[in-house]
């Protein structure tokens, strides 16, 4: 069941296509639909003016599709995710989205809990006993290359391992939509590339609907079916790139290199 949040449409503008050709050809429904969305934030100090984070954004994410949103810092990428997750409401426009699980840039693991208990947190909140939650979480951790680390505390894990635990927790929340907010932004460059390849494999093995925001254009192209480029604040969708390169993808694939230059050109403009 989708959640629908509406607001008055005055002053909104629409700059992105209403649906991708891939979605229309496949006959997929939309897991996320933003239509003419505007979002303002109150002044940070007395006497300053309100900040417009998003201005007339229209975006669809089809069921089973991976869509990445890229743009400069402060352009409203995280705000867009929070709208899709129902954490905030738009000031104008409409947001419709399937129930979502949000994975933030920080892994937000409980420092006193083991890896398996951190992964099983959503199951515990849903009412499962500790034993039952652990029983469901443990096989996923093994699938994610964490066999033998089920009882490790977060400080005993590497950054990449911590992110795998956080992703397992997101999957076990059981929501049809995954919203990923710079999931590898805190990692070093080498670990980040390794985790991008790992996530691509995990999503190939267990397809999900994903809305990903990132400042890394190459990450977006490696992972996504489509890449939406936002302008500097106030964020407007200025381009949508369809990524048709077969998976698994390499950053050096000519098709990705050409799309990277197009995306960077839009960002510079």
Image (spheres, rainbow, N blue to C red):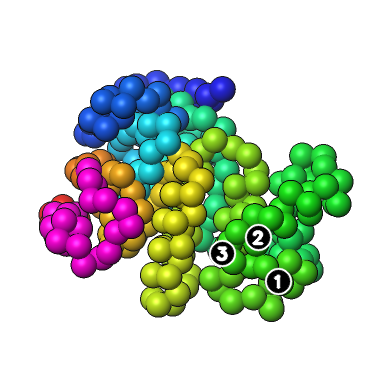
| Position of residue 100 measured from the top left corner of the image (x, y, whole percent) | 55, 38
- Sequence-wise, which precedes: disc 3 or disc 2? 2
Spatial CA span between label 1 and label 3 = 13 Å
**Do tag 3 and tag 2 residues touch (Cβ < 8 Å)?**
no
How many dots with numbers? 3
Is residue 47 highlighted in magenta? no
- Decide if residue 103 is on the left or right side of residue 218: right
- Decide if residue 150 is on the left or right side of residue 16: right
76 and 111: which is toward the camera = 111
The residue indicated by pointer 1 is 149
| Position of residue 210 measured from the top left corner of the image (x, y, whole percent) | 44, 43
Specify start and end residues of the magenta stretch as a single range: 242-264
Q: Quadrant of the C terminus?
A: bottom left
Q: Secondary structure at mark 2?
A: helix
Q: Within the image, what quadrant is residue 12 found in? A: top left
Q: State which mark lies toward you, 1 or 3.
A: 1
Q: Residues within 10 Å of mark 3 (few under 14, many from 20)?
A: many
Is 28 rendered above or below residue 88? above
**Do tag 2 and tag 1 residues touch (Cβ < 8 Å)?**
yes
Q: Secondary structure at mark 3?
A: helix
| Position of residue 258 measured from the top left corner of the image (x, y, whole percent) | 13, 58
Specify the label residue 163 is tagged with: 3
At 71% from the left and 46% from the top, the residue drawn is 122
Is residue 249 highlighted in magenta? yes
Q: Residues within 10 Å of mark 1 (few under 14, many from 20)?
A: some
Q: Residues within 10 Å of mark 2 (few under 14, many from 20)?
A: many
């Amino acid at each position: 069941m989708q959640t629908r949040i509406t607001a008055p449409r005055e002053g909104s503008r629409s700059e992105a296509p209403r649906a991708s050709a891939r979605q229309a050809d496949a006959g997929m429904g939309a897991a996320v639909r933003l239509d003419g969305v505007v979002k303002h934030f109150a002044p940070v100090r007395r006497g300053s003016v309100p900040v417009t984070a998003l201005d007339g954004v229209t975006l669809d994410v089809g069921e089973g599709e991976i869509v990445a949103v890229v743009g400069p810092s402060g352009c409203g990428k995280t705000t867009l995710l929070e709208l899709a997750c129902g954490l905030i409401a738009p000031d104008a426009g409409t947001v419709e989205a399937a129930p979502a699980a949000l994975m933030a840039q920080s892994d937000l693991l409980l420092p006193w809990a083991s890896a398996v208990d951190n992964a099983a947190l959503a199951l515990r909140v849903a009412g499962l006993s500790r034993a039952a939650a652990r029983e469901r979480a443990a096989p996923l951790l093994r699938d994610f290359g964490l066999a033998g680390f089920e009882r490790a505390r977060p400080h005993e894990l590497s950054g990449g391992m911590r992110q795998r635990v956080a992703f397992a927790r997101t999957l076990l929340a059981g929501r049809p939509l995954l919203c990923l907010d710079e999931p590898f932004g805190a990692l070093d460059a080498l670990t980040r590339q390794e985790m991008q390849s790992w996530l691509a494999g995990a999503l190939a093995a267990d397809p999900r609907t994903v809305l990903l925001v990132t400042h890394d254009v190459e990450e977006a192209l490696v992972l996504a079916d489509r890449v939406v480029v936002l302008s500097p604040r106030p964020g407007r969708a200025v381009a949508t790139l369809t990524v048709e390169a077969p998976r698994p993808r390499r950053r050096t694939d000519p098709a990705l290199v050409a799309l990277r230059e197009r995306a960077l050109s839009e960002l510079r403009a």
